[in-house]
Amino acid sequence: MHPEMKEEFRVRRLQVVFDIAAVRGGVRKLCREFGIAKSTYYYWKKRYELLGKSGLYRHKPILYSSPRKTHPEVTEKVLELRNEHNMGPMKIVYYLKRYHGIDVSESTVYRILKAHGVSRLGREKIKRTTHSRRYSKDVPGHHIQMDVKFLFFKDLDGKRIKRFQCTAIDDATRIRALKVYHRHTQANAIDFFDYVVEKFPFRIKTIRTDRGHEFQAKFHWHVEDSGMEHVYIKPMTPQLNGKVERSHRTVLHMANRTFRTDQLMNYILTSLLLEISEEAYIKAQRSHINTIEENHFSEVLEWIRLNMRNNITLTEVANYFHYNPEYFSRIFKKNTKQTFIRYLMEIRSKKARDLLVNTTMGIKEIAFYVGYNNPKYFMKAFKKSEQMTPSEYRSSMCLTHLNNL
């Protein structure tokens, strides 16, 4: 018999027992006849009087308090990112990890959204449009179109080889960067983005890509962390990235030609000369900028160290030293080899280690002293950095000091 049917028969049997007891009385004799313990009878009778028939059904036990339960602050941040910024679960995971140091899984975010009745992201109606007006940006670096082209070759043995050509082209100047990879991954897309930033002789404002898997969350947040904007074109509208698509067709057409013409040779020579001139221009510009930045950047780091107790942000530091926030993010990562958030966490952790060893301040006091408003978050960040809690670190350092006496 099906379990649900069994449960229904059990509930009806209990109802019959209660009805007979109400008419005839004699609970002790009645329980003996139906094979029910008196304690069981009174337990179900109490539920029946309070909740009616629904109280007679068995329910699975629910754990209302779990040590692995998601912290309410994390739940609040997840719902805020979804409601205010319309982010999906994967983007929320990377955002929390990069900007708040919170490690949660995609499945956890999904369960939080589902538990709070947040529906899935709406899909926009796909509508193909025809652009009759041609346009281009006037400012270099305002729009960089980026895409990946699949290339197929045959080796000497006739075996088919597949490669992936990443292409980026500036909308205003038509300066182009190419690089070929063996694999089609987000890591390679990020590497190509860094290559483009290094090679192009101007600041980049926006990167435009399609919605391919190589341009998803990791690539998106890497671009955003570099102080630039990443924009997805609408689905099924390759004409919005028309210049890079045309570039793919030109390269493919040149590769398939079996003879060389004067026009083709002129194109190749012009491309080489442009590349050489660009590299010379970049080197000259960077040598001039580096001499200024190196002298000034030590002051920036010292200011951050002195003000780490405050809730400082990258934008605040950039404005204080009269930098554009996007540009400051780039030069900061170039000079320190890490992001602003990671550097701030590192110097706070270093100061906390010093206070733990050389003072008797409590953990909560140290957390507020080095700039953390939430002591729990401080302990989590410290453990992630040092592989032990602040209390364990203090104990281990004290033992080390005693052993050295």
Image: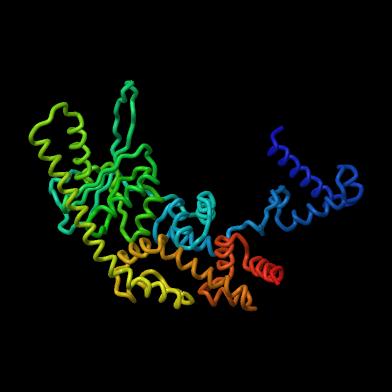
**Left or right of 365 on screen, residue 118:** left
The colour scheme applied to this rendered structure is rainbow
Could you say which quadrant of the image residue 304 lies in? bottom left
Give the x, y percent position of residue 274. Answer: 16, 48
Name which residue lies at 30% across and 39% down.
180
The quadrant the N terminus occupies is: top right
Give the x, y percent position of residue 20. Answer: 83, 47
The quadrant the C terminus occupies is: bottom right
**Left or right of 74 on screen, residue 199:** left
Is 306 drawn above or below residue 207 in the view shown?
Answer: below
Could you say which quadrant of the image residue 87 lies in? bottom left
Give the x, y percent position of residue 348. Answer: 51, 70
- Numbered disc total: 0
Name which residue lies at 18% across and 37% down.
250
Front position in the image: 259 or 58: 259
Front position in the image: 29 or 346: 346
Name which residue lies at 44% across and 65% down.
341
Front position in the image: 323 or 112: 323
Is 2 drawn above or below residue 380 in the view shown?
Answer: above
Could you say which quadrant of the image residue 261 lies in? top left
